[in-house]
């Protein structure tokens, strides 16, 4: 082969190598940006997953508190029913009569009620005129 043709082919080979190396460099840069994007995407997904777990834990704690408060409400309602039954038993007519007899209270025979139209005054001048 003549030398002139060989030189041309060598130049063509060098050009191909330069083009290939440029392609490799640009593809290496793309790989870096893709891996960086993948890293940030992975971190974002992990952050959302951590937040999701945190919210679930808070929800479970609130459910336990709610159940404890329901038990407390039920016990308080039972206590209220007991107190209401005691009040109902203590207000019976027979019990009131026995308490009145123990305190030596007597029945009222002559009850005087105030008339709604006449309001007594506290002044002494009204009593002096009568």
Image (cartoon, rainbow, N blue to C red):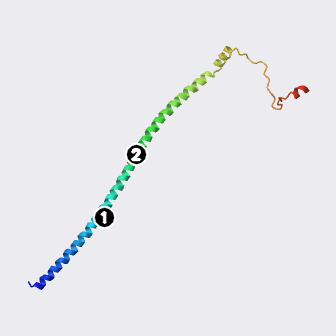
Which image quadrant is residue 27 in? bottom left
**Left or right of 112 in this view: 81:** left
Front-lying residue, 93 or 61: 61
Report which residue position mark 2 lands on.
56
Report which residue position mark 1 lands on.
33
Residue 128 image offset from top left, x and y in percent: 90, 26
Give the mark nearest the N terminus, 1 or 2: 1
Determine the residue positioned at 14% across, 81% down: 9
Front-lying residue, 26 or 119: 26
Which image quadrant is residue 130 in? top right
**Tag 2 secondary structure:** helix
Calculate the distance from the C-alpha at mark 1 to the C-alpha at mark 2.
35 Å
Residue 60 image offset from top left, x and y in percent: 41, 42
Residue 31 image offset from top left, x and y in percent: 27, 64
Q: Label 2 neighbourhood size at 10 Å, few (<14), some (14-19), many (20+)?
A: few
Determine the residue positioned at 60% across, 22% down: 89
Is residue 15 depicted above or below 110 in this figure?
below
Is residue 73 depicted above or below 15 in this figure?
above
């Amino acid at each position: 082969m003549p030398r002139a043709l060989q030189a041309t082919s060598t130049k063509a080979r060098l050009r191909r190598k330069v083009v290939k190396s440029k392609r490799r460099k640009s593809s290496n840069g793309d790989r870096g940006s893709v891996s960086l994007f993948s890293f940030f995407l992975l971190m974002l997904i992990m952050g959302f997953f951590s937040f999701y777990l945190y919210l679930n834990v808070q929800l479970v704690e609130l459910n336990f508190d709610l159940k404890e408060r329901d038990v407390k409400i039920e016990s308080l309602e039972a206590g209220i029913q007991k107190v209401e039954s005691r009040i109902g038993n203590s207000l019976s007519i027979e019990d009131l009569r026995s308490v009145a007899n123990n305190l030596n209270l007597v029945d009222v025979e002559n009850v005087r009620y105030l008339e709604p139209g006449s309001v007594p005054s506290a002044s002494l001048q009204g009593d002096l005129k009568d």
